[in-house]
Structures are given as structure tokens and as C-alpha cells.
Image (cartoon, coloured by chain):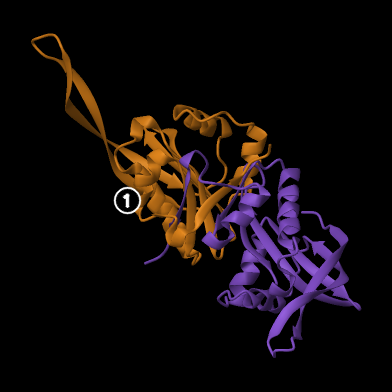
Chain colours: A purple, B orange
Amino acid sequence: MTFWKFFFNYKQTTKLKKQTKDGTTNVFVKKVEKSNIYMSTCKKINLEELEKLCDSVGWVRRPLKKVKFALENSFLTISVFQIENKYKRLIGFARVTSDGSFNATIWDVVIHPDFQGNGLGTILMNQVIKKLREYDISTITLFADPQVVKFYQHIGFIVDPDSVKGMFWYPT
Amino acid sequence: MTFWKFFFNYKQTTKLKKQTKDGTTNVFVKKVEKSNIYMSTCKKINLEELEKLCDSVGWVRRPLKKVKFALENSFLTISVFQIENKYKRLIGFARVTSDGSFNATIWDVVIHPDFQGNGLGTILMNQVIKKLREYDISTITLFADPQVVKFYQHIGFIVDPDSVKGMFWYPT
């Protein structure tokens, strides 16, 4: 697995609040800031930082030892960092299990809420697909919660193609 | 990944045809034969034999080089052999991609048509689940063609739990 970097300018739009004459608060101004966004497939990931990122979207905390093992056994991990004033902040993540040949499954796709709604998730997913296509992997799969199905459809994912059904087994 | 063996007696039932007095042929007798069935997680798999097994259920032939790479990068493979008169025949197979920690996806589940309908697929799947549970993996997934959804439901798999959807991306 190669190491790679990807820099680009990212426009962060921030909604500003302003109080009107009648006392109500309305959101009506957008502040646009630029910062450098960096992506990496390096697996040396700060586990605490990753779990904090997962916290930010409300995921359940997981034992760090298991997270470490999962990352080591993932075929691909992509971390997204914001770099500002030499400070590196983990703001996005995705990882993949795969046979490196035919099939891949994408897990744990997360973008920090501060950076959502600006296309960063789409860029991350397209990078995941690009990396997997370098291995000529043609069946790229994932399991999507109902609220993100449209997001993945926008990227080109299809729900239940040819009536193939995603199925889960859980311990009882 | 440990190597393991599993022997048991397997009752192979064969439907026999008999001609009735009016000239029609009816299937009405079952012949029961016993043979030793052997399961192994060893990844040293005869690729030609595996592809022949896949041929037997009508799957499209795949480049052996890619198959070899896929097996090497699979987290778990289980091969099912019939042993008769010292002759070892590959009659079943399943493999898994996984992070070894949280999630696993089962691919390429196949039982030779000569051995279908006798519960061997269920035994194979239960062995796959058992091995994954040894790693405390709790999310075991697969993608099922419509005609095998009921088979997997019988084993305990659930379609779209909490409306989570299986999604696929294919190259255009």
C-alpha cells in the first residue's frame, strides 16, 4: 500500500448569526475561509483522535485495542486532515476491507460536522474509489444508513442491484 | 490464521429413477451413502480445482492470478473436501474479507450441485460464523442473490436491518 498526499484549497463556509430589530436571531451571512486539506493513506493513525472524530458524529466509543487491530487489517484507510498554522486536525476518515482483487467494502465513513455540507464527503469517497480502481477492484460495496443512501447514490452507488440484498448476522 | 480440520460423516442422498408400468419415469427412491467430509482454513488452494467448483454452479471464469491474490488477501477461507478412497475432492468453499475486529463480509459461498440440498451449505456457513466469532467479530455481512436470501435467513441473517441498505458501485 503506497503512501500519498493530496492538497487542495477548501472553502469553509460559516453561517453567522445576526440579531434583527425585533429581537429575533437570524442566520443570514456566510463567511468563507480557505484552508489546506490533506489526505493520507498512512495507517499510523492517532487512535484517540480518530475516536474523537467518531464521537463528533455520535458513534458509540469502541475499545482502542480493537480499533488498532481493525486499522491494521483494513485494506485501505484514508484520513482527511485540515492544516492550519502548522496544526493538523483529523476531520474525515474512511476505511475499506477488501481482497485486493475483486471485492471491497467501505466502512466508517465520517466527516466532522464542522466540515459537512461542502462536498468533502464526496471528495473523500471519490478518492476511496480511485484507490480501489488502481487495484482493478470492480465490486465496491457498502452498507448505508437510510439518511445517507441519497448521498451514496449521488456518488454512483446503487441500492440492491439485480435485487441483490445486503444481509447481516449479529450474535444473539 | 490457524489451520484446522473437521471430520464428520455425511449422508449423501441420491434420488433414483424407476420406470412404472405405464412407461413413465418417476423419482421415488433415495439411496443413502456415507462419506467423510473435511473442512480446512488452509489457504493453499488448488486454483484450477476452485474454478472448476465455481464452474459447476455456473459462475463466470476469473483470471487465476486475480483469484490467487484475492485468496491471499482474504481474512478467512474455508474449503470443503469429500474424501473417498484417498481421493480428495473440493466440493464447497467460502471466503471472507474482514478487519479481524468489527466487520466481516462473506463472499463466494459455493457447494457443488451433487452435494446441495443436504445441509452442507448450512454447516459451512455455521463454521464461517464460528471462526469469525472466535475473533469477536460481531457484524457479519454478505450480499445475497434473491434465490438464496431464504437460505441465509434460515441461518440467522437479516435483510436490511434498521433499513440499512446494501449498495454497490461498479465501473462504467
Q: Mark 1 points at which residue?
A: B154
Label 1: state its secondary structure. helix
Q: Which residue is drawn at 63% across and 78% down?
A: A55
Is A150 or B148 nearer to us in this picture? A150
Outermost residue, front direction?
A: A22
Q: Position of residue A116 (x, y in %)?
A: 71, 68
Is B25 or B36 nearer to us in this picture? B25
Q: Answer whether residue A145 is visible to the viewer in this image.
A: no
**Residue B102 vertical position relative to residue A56 in the rendered view, above or below:** above
Outermost residue, right direction?
A: A85
Q: Position of residue B167 (x, y in %)?
A: 56, 49
Q: Answer whether residue B54 is visible to the viewer in this image.
A: yes
Pick the quarter of the image with the C terminus of chain B: top right
Tell me which chain the residue with mark 1 is part of: B
Q: In which quarter of the image is residue A16?
A: bottom right
Q: Position of residue A54 (x, y in %)?
A: 64, 74
**Residue B66 vertical position relative to residue A6 in the rendered view, above or below:** above
**Residue B15 vertical position relative to residue B24 in the rendered view, above or below:** below
Question: On the rendered structure, is A5 left or right of A127?
Answer: right
Question: On the rendered structure, is A163 left or right of B72?
Answer: left
Pick the quarter of the image with the N terminus of chain B: bottom right
Q: Where is residue A132 in the image (x, y as percent from the top left)?
A: 71, 48
Outermost residue, top direction?
A: B23
Q: Residue at x 45, y 28 (%)?
A: B56
Within 10 angstroms of label 1, few (less than 14), some, or many (20 or more) residues? few
Q: Which residue is drawn at 43% across and 59% down?
A: B161
Question: On the rendered structure, is B82 left or right of A90?
Answer: left
The amino acid on which the numbered mark 1 sits, given as a three-letter code, is His
Q: Which residue is drawn at 76% across and 68% down?
A: A44
**Residue A161 vertical position relative to residue B131 in the rendered view, above or below:** above
